[in-house]
Structure formats: C-alpha cells, structure tokens
Image (cartoon, grey):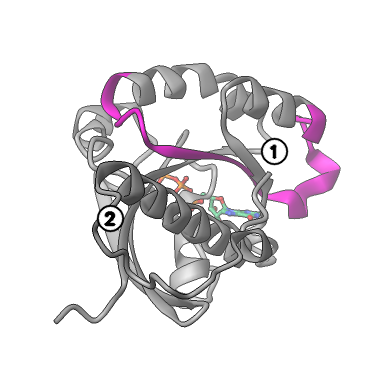
C-alpha cells in the first residue's frame, strides 16, 4: 500500500544563479542556504504535503542552469508533471533567455506539462529590471501561470508549490475522468473545492 494519494514530479529550470536551488531548499528544508554553489547536473528532493486530507508526494528535481549541463537536464523534462521556469527579477538577461527555455520545453517536455513562470528575488526590489506587468503578459502569452517569489525572505515559496500541487491534483482527476469514466478516483465521493487552494492565476 502506497503512503500517498498522489505523486507528482516537478522540475525547476532556468538560467544559472536565478535561485532554483534556494527555492527548493526553502520549501523542503525551510532554510536559505548561505553561499549556495552552482548545481552540478541535477539534484533531487522529496517533500510530502497534505492538502485537504490527502497526501501528495512531490518529487522535486533541481537542474543546473549552466549551458554545459543542458544535455543532462533535458532528459528530466519528459516525465515531469510540472515545470517551474525561473528567472531573476533583478536580472534582465535571465528574463530575455526565457524564449530559449520555452523552446526546450516544447522539444523535450510532455504536451500536458503544467508550467509556472516564477520571478524570484523580489527582496531585491530596488534592483528590479523586469516589471511584473511585462512578466505577467509574457506568461499569459505562453499559457503559463505566473508568480513572484523570494527564496531569501520566504515570500510565496509555499504558495508556489502548494498551488501547483492543487493544480496537478485537479489535472490528474480530469485526466482520469477522460481516460476511464467508470473507474473510481482517489478521494471519489469527497467534494474538494480546488478554487480554495488553487490560486495560481
Ligand atoms: N537576494 C536573493 N538572493 C537569492 C535568492 N534566491 C537565491 N539567491 C542567491 O542567488 C544565488 C544563486 O542561487 P542558486 O539557488 O544557487 O541559483 P540556481 O538557479 O540554483 O543556480 P544554478 O544551480 O547554477 O542553476 C545565490 O547566491 C543565492 O544566495 C532570493 O530570493 N533573494
């Protein structure tokens, strides 16, 4: 018997230094690591969360942003349920590279993947180079959810992962319905209001 109701694989991608590892460590360990070095290849963490009485196991894959690891990291896209495409709001260059990342997603990820665009480091508001409006428009144009975070100050980090988990539960239920209308679903019979827990726009 499994010890969870849902298992989802979430992969973080984006330029080197935008804060992917810090977001993962803030969420999984509740800390902001001092002097965080660059990720080599891919790192992996697990966190189980409980949402409305159901256990959701999140497998979180933190990929290296450096170009030289691209062929390794690409192989992790295919089985991802969700991608967190991260840029740094204080670094225009990390935002300008987003179209390249979208090409990678199109090429290597499943068509059903849920993608969230995350602008990290909002604690550096005085150095902001990418406006919220510009990022929001970019996200909408490419069918992504959008959120700004600070791994350092812990702003919106829980929300990012928990809203994503809610969204994935909702998608999983819908897919199960489409694939087999007659089969029982996990939690069937209980009414779950996703609107209450899913606030990603
Ligand atoms: N001010 C601020 N700094 C941050 C934040 N998140 C990460 N950093 C810093 O940004 C730098 C890079 O963070 P990482 O988490 O290693 O970035 P990464 O995207 O995982 O980088 P790669 O592993 O090279 O792809 C580190 O010096 C962090 O301390 C944040 O929310 N605010």
Check residue 112 in the rendering and tell me which mark sits there, or answer none.
none
Q: Indicate the position of residue 58 as horizontal and vertical percent values.
A: 35, 64
Residue 9 in sight: yes
Query: What residue do we see at 30% from left, 19% from top?
Result: 107
Q: Quadrant of the rendered structure where residue 101 is?
A: top left
Residue 63 in sight: no
Q: Quadrant of the rendered structure where residue 70 is?
A: top left
Q: Quadrant of the N terminus?
A: bottom left
Determine whether 91 is above or below 21 in the image.
above
Q: Quadrant of the C terminus?
A: top right
Determine whether 163 is above or below 67 in the image.
below
The segment highlighted magenta reads 107-133
- Left or right of 120? Residue 5 is left
- The secondary structure type at the circle numbered 2 is strand
Foreground residue, 63 or 48?
48
Check residue 43 in the rendering and tell me which mark sits there, or answer none.
2
- The secondary structure type at the circle numbered 1 is loop
Query: What residue do we see at 41% from left, 77% from top?
Result: 54
**Does residue 126 belong to the magenta stretch?**
yes
In the displayed image of the protein, which residue is found farthest to the left?
A: 1
Determine whether 89 is above or below 199 in the image.
above
Q: Earlier in the sequence, mark 2 or mark 1?
A: 2
Q: Indicate the position of residue 136 as horizontal and vertical percent values.
A: 72, 31
Q: Indicate the position of residue 86 as horizontal and vertical percent values.
A: 53, 40
Query: What residue do we see at 28% from left, 36% from top?
Result: 77
**Does residue 90 belong to the magenta stretch?**
no
Check residue 89 in the rendering and tell me which mark sits there, or answer none.
1
């Amino acid at each position: 018997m499994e010890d969870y109701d849902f298992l989802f694989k979430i992969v973080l991608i984006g330029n080197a230094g935008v804060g992917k590892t810090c977001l993962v460590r803030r969420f999984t360990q509740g800390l902001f690591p001092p002097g965080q070095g660059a990720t080599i290849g891919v790192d992996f963490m697990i966190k189980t969360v409980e949402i409305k009485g159901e256990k959701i196991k999140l497998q979180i894959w933190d990929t290296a942003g450096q170009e030289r690891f691209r062929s390794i990291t690409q192989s992790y896209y295919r089985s991802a349920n969700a991608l967190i495409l991260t840029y740094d709001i204080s670094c225009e260059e990390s935002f300008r590279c987003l179209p390249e990342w979208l090409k990678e997603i199109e090429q290597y990820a499943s068509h059903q993947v849920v993608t969230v665009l995350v602008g990290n480091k909002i604690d550096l508001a005085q150095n902001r180079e990418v406006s919220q409006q510009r990022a929001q428009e970019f996200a909408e144009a490419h069918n992504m959810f959008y959120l700004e975070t600070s791994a350092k100050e812990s702003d919106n980090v829980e929300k990012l992962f928990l809203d994503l988990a809610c969204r994935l539960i909702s998608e999983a239920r819908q897919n199960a319905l489409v694939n087999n209308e007659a089969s029982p679903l996990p939690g069937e019979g209980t009414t779950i209001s996703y609107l209450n827990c899913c606030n990603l726009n």
